[in-house]
Image: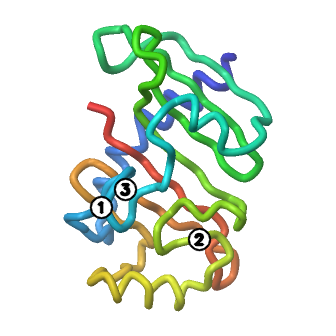
Amino acid sequence: MMKLEAVILAMVLCGLPCAAQAKDDRYVETLACIGGPFGLGVPPTYSALRKLGPIEREATAVPDGPADGKAVRRAIWFPGLVLDLYSFPDQPERYLLASATITDPRWTLAGPLHVGQTLDDARQHLAALGVTLGPSLSLGGDGDTITLKLSGNAISEIDYSCYTG
C-alpha cells in the first residue's frame, strides 16, 4: 500500500506541473483525457470500466481529492493498462480519471495513437487533426497532457495525465 501511495503522490506532485513546465510541449485546445479526438475511449460508468479486461490487481489509497473527501483514490491494473482514478462511494457508477498508462498494443483507447505505432505514423495522424508533435513528444491541453515514450522509432508507452480539479 505504501508503494501505491508513493506512486500516486509522485504522479500528483509531478504529473501536471512537470508537464506544464516542459518547454517543448505543444498546446492542443481540443486535448482532453476523455472526449474529443485525443481522449481515451473509456466507458462512462465505473462498473463498465472494470469490465474492460481481466484485472491483474487493484489498490485503494487514503481517501483524498475532489468532492471534499468523499472520493476514494484507486489504481486498477489491467494487462498493459494502468488506470489511476477517483471513485465515489455515494455515487457508485461515477469515476474521475486522474491518469492512464498504456503499454500494450492491444489497447486501442488513445484516439489516433497506439503502442507499437511508429513515430512518423503518429505524426501523420496528428497532422491530419491539425496538431504538430514537438520534440518533447508531449501534447498539452487545458489541464490534461499526453506523453509518448519511445523504443527505437515506435511508441512503447502512452501516458495520460488528467486534471481532476
104 versus 117 height, above or below: above
Q: Residue at x 64, y 25 (%)?
A: 4
53 versus 145 height, above or below: above
- Disc number at residue 114? 2
- Disc number at residue 31? 1
- Pick the front one: 51 or 66: 51
Position of residue 31 measured from the top left corner of the image (x, y, whole percent):
30, 61
Q: Residue at x 38, y 50 (%)?
A: 34
Q: Give the mark nearer the N terminus: 3 vs 2.
A: 2
Q: Residue at x 40, y 58 (%)?
A: 39
- Pick the front one: 41 or 144: 41
The quadrant of the rendering that contains the C terminus is top left
Position of residue 18 measured from the top left corner of the image (x, y, whole percent):
37, 49
Position of residue 79 measured from the top left corner of the image (x, y, whole percent):
77, 48
Position of residue 118 measured from the top left corner of the image (x, y, whole percent):
61, 85
Residue 125: quarter of image? bottom left
Q: Residues within 10 Å of mark 2 (few under 14, many from 20)?
A: many
Q: Residues within 10 Å of mark 3 (few under 14, many from 20)?
A: many
Mark count: 3
Q: Are marks 1 and 3 in contact (CB under 8 Å)?
A: yes
Q: Residues within 10 Å of mark 1 (few under 14, many from 20)?
A: many
Task: Determine whether the residue tagged by mark 1 lies in a helix, strand or loop.
Answer: loop
Q: Identify which amino acid the numbered label 3 is placed on.
A: Thr
Give the CA separation, mark 2 to mark 1. Answer: 16 Å
Q: Describe residue 62's horizontal placement relative to residue 53 as left or right.
A: left
- Disc number at residue 145? 3
